[in-house]
Image (cartoon, helix red, strand yellow):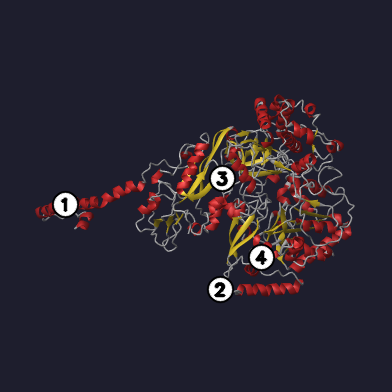
Amino acid sequence: MPNTLSRRDFLKVGGAAVGALVLGRFIPPLVAEAARATGMLDATNSGYIPTMCEMCVWRCGVLAKVEDGRVVKLEGNPNHPHSKGNLCPRGQSGLMNTYDPDRVLSPLVRVGKRGEGLFRKTSWNEALDIVATNMLKIKEKYGPEAMVFSSTHNLSQVQFENLLYAFGSPNYGTQRSLCFNAMITAFSLTYGVEEPSRKYDDVEFILMVGRNMMEAISTSETSELSHAIDRGAKFVYLDPRYTKTASKATEWIPIRPGTDSAFLLAMINVIVSNELADCEFVKQYVVGCDGIKAAMQGYTPKWAEEITGVPATTIERIAREYAATKHNALAHPGWRTSNFINSFQTERAIATLNALSGNVLTPGGCLSTEMAAEGAGLGAPPQPPYPRVSALRLDGVPWKYPLVPLKLGVFQELRDAILTGEPYQAHGWFISRQNPILSLPDRAKTLEAFSKMDFITTVDIIMNDTAWFSDVVLPETSYLERYDPLLPIGDKAFIRQPVVEPQGEAKSALWIYKQLGERLGLGDFFQYADEEDYLRQQLAPLGVSLEEVKSKGYAEMPETESSGEITFNTPSGKIEVYSETLKNAGFSPWPTWEEPPQPAEGQFYLLTGKVAQQTQFGTQNNKLLHKYSDEPRLWMNAKVAAEKGLADGDWVKVTSEVGKANVRLLATQAIRPDCVYLTPGYGHLSKGLTTAFGIGASDSVLHVTYTDPISGGQALSQTFVTVKKA
Amino acid sequence: MSEIKQHAFLFDAARCIDCRACMVACSVENKIPMDKTRIWVSGIGVKGEYPNLERATMVYHCMHCEDPDCASACPVGAWVKRSDGPVLYDSKVCIGCRYCMNACPFGVPHYDWDKGLIDGAFIDKCSMCPQRIDIGLEPACVATCPTDALVFGERADLLKEAHARIAAHPDRYVDHVYGETENGGTSYLIVSHVPFKELGLPELGPTPLKDISELIMGGTLPFALGLTAVLSGVAAGVHAYNNNKEAKEEHSEAQEELPAKTEATK
């Protein structure tokens, strides 16, 4: 390609010009042209462009190899702390998201019944007008609170939140209650920090409770754990399944589901009753030092043995080993901790174990609560204050769930409030980059909630199940085709930038929210001319040009000075093993044992958990990942299967209180006899996903909705099922 | 060009988490069709009985033998061992005879049954990414591996590294570096926490199979010539006998047909 402007480019310029006439502004310079100008691409439009992965929420740095306008390979960026040069299978497959033949490439308006899959293509102008008109109609008739907004964990979320708060709705659905509410609520209450970071440099003892790090991969942390094991750190892993992580553990403990906290409380009991804790640290920084021995008195290893099925001697030994390792011991906070109604207590016990080992803020300690304020040092577009919201939140925060942080929410409760119409009826749902139909427990209920809506809009790159049931689908550019706001990590702010031209009519979330905001009369909340202008406003205080950041991949941030003083952002300024806040809300101030329900005779615990090749509910249609994924079968202990007359590969019918699913059986030794396991994210309803449709079964069909009253977390493993030959 | 004299991989089964990032990276880098793969998972997977379990898997590449059997078996020279390590396959030269498939003791060359001579590329197998190593990059699989289960470098250095790992953790590893001597040595070295057989690797001696086959092949021509001479002699004898018989039974209608082979040897 010796010409600097090909015929294709010319057509695109022409198309963009027409688009500009229609929409008035917002024409970013062509991707390749801009990249050539900064020297990232050569005259043949080939080269490497730094950007950030979006195949999960870890956000690894990526070097995208581009050849003649197409991305041909993704490499882990060695200059990014989350990838350190590596990518996991999902990161490596990222380009197939962009080149998915099932991409939605123009705005769609439903013409058939909901869920029938009949849509017509339309222009952005018409699609945005339809969305805005319907949203305004709902606002006028029922108030802004009748519009529900949901989106989770993406870099444009800040502008999504802008849209919802400017619109005036308190109803914000995040996936977080299906994921890490228990961990974040527990650590916020205990340490005043949402998620402490882990340091593996000097770790000698690692305790992980169901954190399947080798399959739920966070590239840099998975790497760090692997290297720690490699050099001989002791790794104790609790999980009812023999996961790939279990296979790397020094000691795998196939604990009874729902009893992790009993195991951990007994560890605390051994440590405090034998005075094995780092007393100096504890006395200085921990609230609860005096009462803890009495509070933990009943939680003996013998007591825990009966509940957990783990021998008392094992618990005692592990507790002593943990304590002896002092601040080089790490009890990992975990990530998706939505397992049982008592998962919050599990997290509180983990937080306590860390406090007792003195690993926090100690030199060489492996837990850090130092957190830079999000976006500190970066600029932002100016905007007016949000309108005052007086309506209650449908998800019960804080009036029903006083301790759940507002930005986490209780998504499953929000869905249930749509069904009951209490405290008021919601009428519209604006969803972006989220798939509640597949992710929320009890899919039948979610579909019913959808049917109660006057109007549903979904922003996505493919026709996921939620888009399939929507009235308008707005096609977003893939992460390799768009800008998102900068991501600060440590002393740098990293960029996600387009490495190829967007396909079809797809547009970035920043563009979509702005266009919609303007149509809703909220233009003042979106004061940026285009995506690049947004980033320039972010960079303004740093005095760095966007061009420099584009070619380097990041901007240096000014160093924040540490006062050197150890304080925690809790009411007492200390680590609150004993929490007044919990007590005042009517809960136990100490980490405590709460007995979860157990399956009846003939029933199994239905476990969930990730595989390394897929992320949640959004990647199953990626052909490269599909190529290297195992068939999502129902795991059952091989001995139990034989007793039930079931053979490996048989079709079985799985039945829970709320649903049924047919799936093939995997008879394996790698699971407790009282459990079965199903990979989440399969069993799609959308026929617009030609790769994923027809594969596996959805565990959301089976999941019963249970909410932890403290953290708002959904108890995903508290569903019990029967399994019969189909 | 890279300064490495003899490139090699070192795979550590104890480090591999079976995430398959290497497989995806390879597929993208080398533009492998969706129904093919150049790397696959082998091994017995989860073994033992609950709860006493162990996992044994490895990512199986081409072994890039020092003295490759495929190259030896190939009648047209479609296989070449590059002096710096990679064993390369040239689809333009290949005639599709599949001798290499039978020759490789590791079962690496996979024949594409759907392809004819005209389509070319009968075989897809690991190439050690020469397009990358020639400009100083690691092969795609190695570059992305999150746990360093796969590393790449000078073969002699990696051998040292492999032995050092075994020495540092004798309780963890089997005391052997697979590929150091197997089949005359390979450029894909393996250390493991389980016996190599459980990873799906064949038990091989230090002599490449090709040396044995070449020994046989070396004797084949003289043997064939000798056999031809013997058979010609036999045929001549039969012919003479028949002529003799013919002469004796001049009026007989049941004249025997000569065996085709004897015709051919005339």
Q: Is residue A346 left or right of residue B247?
A: right
Which chain is indicated by disc 4?
A
The amino acid marked with disc number 1 is Gly
Q: Residues within 10 Å of mark 3 (few under 14, many from 20)?
A: many
Report if the CB atoms under discs 3 and 1 are less than 8 Å apart.
no
Residue B233 — which label? 1
The residue where tag 3 is placed is B18
Look at discs 1 and 2 and give the one toward the viewer: 2
Between circles 2 and 4, the one closer to the viewer is 2
Q: Which residue is mark 2?
A: A2
Name the amino acid, label 4: Pro
Task: Tell me the CA gap for discs 3 and 4.
Answer: 34 Å
Say which chain tag 3 marks. B
Amino acid type for the residue under numbered disc 2: Pro
Q: Earlier in the sequence, mark 3 or mark 1?
A: 3
* Quarter occupied by residue A301: top right
Q: Between tags 2 and 3, which lies in front?
A: 2
Position in image of residue A337 (x %, y %): 72, 41
For the C terminus of chain A, the quadrant is top right
